[in-house]
Amino acid sequence: MPLQMTAIPCLRDNYAYLLHDPATGRTGVVDVPDVAPIHDALDAAGHRLSDIFITHHHDDHIGGVMRLQEDTGAAIWGARADAHRLPPLDHALGEGDTVRLGSQEGVVIDVPGHTIGHIAFHFPESGLAFTADSLMALGCGRLFEGTPAQMWDSLCKLMALPDETLICSGHDYSQGNAGFALHVDPGNAALQARVTQMQADRAANRPMAVVPLALEKATNPFLRAGQDYLKQAHDRVGVSDAEMFACLRGMKDTF
């Protein structure tokens, strides 16, 4: 039985994700930007928190972790490489390690770029991947610590997941990301259709940061850096895919 997932808006544009295993009653949360919205979601569902999964060290993802842990006694899972700048970890993780939430197992994916110690969590049986500020809806995170080559490698790992995987990212930057995507890839019919659909999704209050990987691969310009037509359109014929990604990321930084 797959995990039940609830996207929780936090702060101005962040998302936390509540995960519940109906087989065992265990409940986890991915990232804790703020405490109150997560308590509200737990109370509404009648769940007790057992686990906290951290993707990276930025305060808008861990700002509420210690308070939530004190309130619930939940175990904290996070990157071993970032342990020095995370709340105290009960489970220190690295590439390929397994996490468990009740009857469900997840796999840790090392995704440096936005930060050096950034990790993602993939729960294959539930078809969920929590990518925070690595792969985002129609975009990717700004490179605060890593290199373009590191981020491209991270995105390639995520692109290798099954197409039906739901990508659950850390922010709703979809409006700005859509504007940039249309700017650099204006002839992409799938992108045009997605932007039109986004208007209806936003009006219906659907979480904009949760998107099937197949749709990201068809519309997210950062995942399309290997497309020859995109290289040609931006006078980058013959460059490597990683170099094209670096070009696009640089354009987005000044867009």
Image: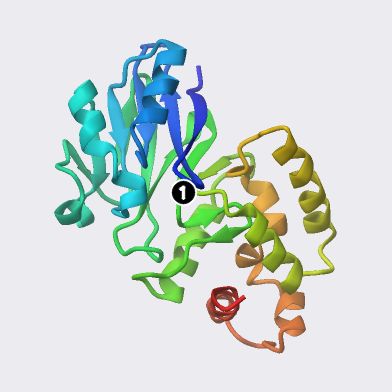
Residue tagged by mark 1?
A: 131
Residue shown at 73% from the left, 76% from the top: 230
Residue 95 percent across, percent down from the top left: 31, 51
Q: Amino acid at mark 1?
A: Thr
User: Which quadrant holds residue 23?
Assistant: top left
The foreground one among 200 and 126 is: 200
Q: For this view, does 205 lie left or right of residue 45? A: right
Rendered-image quadrant of the C terminus: bottom right
* Image side of residue 240 versus residue 14, left or right: right
**Residue 20 visible in rendering:** no
Q: Residue at x 36, y 38 (%)?
A: 34
Instruction: Give the image quarter of residue 91.
Output: top left
- Residue depicted at 45% across the width and 61% down the height: 154
- Whole-percent x and y of residue 211? 63, 43
Relative to 57, residue 99 above or below: above
Counting the numbered discs, the total is: 1
The answer to whether residue 101 is above or below residue 255 is above
Q: Is residue 61 visible?
A: yes
Using the image as rendered, state which of residue 82 and residue 104 is in the foreground: 82
Tell me: residue 43, above or below residue 30.
Answer: above
Q: Secondary structure at mark 1?
A: strand
The residue positioned 42% from the left and 22% from the top of the image is: 40
Binning the other alpha carbons within 10 Å of mark 1 as few (below 14), some (14 to 19) or many (20 upward) gives: many
Q: Residue 147, percent across and down? A: 40, 75
